[in-house]
Amino acid sequence: MDSQDSRTPPASRSRNTERILLLFFVFSLPLLNPWVRGDGVGYYALVRAPLIEHSLDFTRDYENANPSFRDARVDEHGRPKSIFRTPTGHLENHFSVGPAILWTPFLLLTHAGVLFARALGSSVAADGFSAPYRITMALATAFYGFLGLLLAFRLARQYVEDRWALLATFSIWWASSLPIYMYFNPSWSHAHSAFAVALFLWYWHKTRAARSRRDWFILALIAGLMMDVYYVNAFVLFVLVIEGIPQYLSALRHDSGPSVETLRLSDLIVSHVLFALTLLVCLLPTFITRYFIYGNPFESAYPPLRNWPWFSPALLRVLFSSNHGLLAWTPILLFSILGLFLFWRREPLSSYGSRYFVSLTPLFVLGLAVFLDRFSQLFHSRRAAFAAAFPLALLILWNAGLMFQWGTHLIPARGPVSFSEVAHNQVFVVPREFSANLLRYFSNRKGLMQQIEQRDIQQLENTQPK
């Protein structure tokens, strides 16, 4: 560490680093694309319908959806098809309620502002679809995405220098799938999921040395939100299993009558029961919405767990498939995974692309930070170590080009892609079209989005059996 860094208090350095992240976030806000599209129709309907319709009637959400979502769900008269009605008479909506919970405080203020403006003569529609609502939704999504990154940075800097935590955070921010769901498709759940998981892991890590009953209660509140946002996040709770097994084993070894260890065992049981009960209460929004929509609080409308291919693992396809494989689409995560392996060896008791992994953003940041820290130890010069980060810049540029291809439908938005076509486009097509489309993105975004939607419809039609 250089002499200037050594004269700067650690707390001040961390605050300065966080200001850098905040500055980048503010300058990134013009990238926000306040539209509700695809899966986002379902997520957004769970906040718009109760706020505007005071019910879970999603008819207007179906009618106002983007064409590729709407056309499959409405008849020639524009009415929702009966096959999309559930046994309770509601329109099908299997999307999670967590994003709606996180949007609600912001949209309540927006709705109040729109109603006040209308009372003064404004013509802005108070329907949940007009620009103020969509812009608020997009801003809130980006805000939660940034909070997730900030928490991931704070977690990573517990183990590495701020410089590596910052570089890792910035690299995962722009070289992963997160920007798609933080800016381009803000009505989807994945940026919210990254935030909720980051909040859970950060608070779990902060309190793991000595967790009070109050801490267990707060951790359960966060865990409930995390699962309300994205059901699969339940797997993150495995860190509590890893943490709890040695604690129970340690307590059970002491069987010589009443002692501190015996009391500790009872404290563990009480704390975990408190956590479980609080978690169930926090899942009530999910249970209630499932009950009203499907008539069964435990109906997710996703394939049941018993139908998952538990005995037919597809790890290589998940990682390397041209059909949105994790490492094939976001190769920077290879370094994150290597870093997590190094971290596990050092801390054995801790434990677009493929959007299902966006939730693990804080772990990817931690893994990449540890990898960079270990890699830097190979060099005697800090400048040489930073020069080794040059490949990260290339990965960010590659990801930007791939996001552009995916977003403008130069490559199929669904299903497998040709990597030779991707590579050709990166070299010969993206440089030519990027600047023109970027200008349109800021000057005529509505027209560009309509063009992208039309391309999506054409690709869907081309994939339909003749």
Image: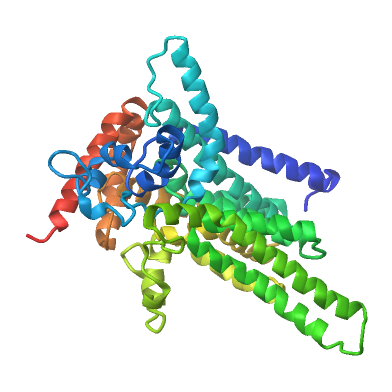
Judged left or right of residue 11, residue 274 is left
Give the quarter of the figure containing the C terminus: bottom left
The residue at 53%/45% (across/down) is 101
Q: Is residue 280 above or below residue 285?
A: below
Question: For the point 88% across and 79% down, which residue is it?
Answer: 261
Q: Position of residue 374 (x, y in %)?
A: 66, 66
Q: Nearer the viewer, residue 18 or 167?
A: 18
Q: How is the image coloured?
A: rainbow
* Residue 257 coordinates in the image, percent (x, y): 92, 87
Dividing the picture into quadrants, the one containing residue 352 is bottom left
Q: Residue at x 65, y 66 (%)?
A: 276
User: Where in the figure is residue 241, as x and y percent of width and height?
Assistant: 66, 74
In the rendered image, the vertical position of residue 384 relative to residue 378, given as above or below = above
Residue 134 lies, in percent from the top left, at 42, 32
Q: Nearer the viewer, residue 370 or 376?
A: 370
Q: Is residue 294 left or right of residue 138?
A: left
113 w.r.t. 460: above or below: above
Residue at the spot x=36%, y=76% of the render?
A: 307
Q: Please name whichever residue, 365 or 290, is drawn nearer the observer in this view of the structure.
A: 290
Vertical order, 276 against 12 (above or below): below
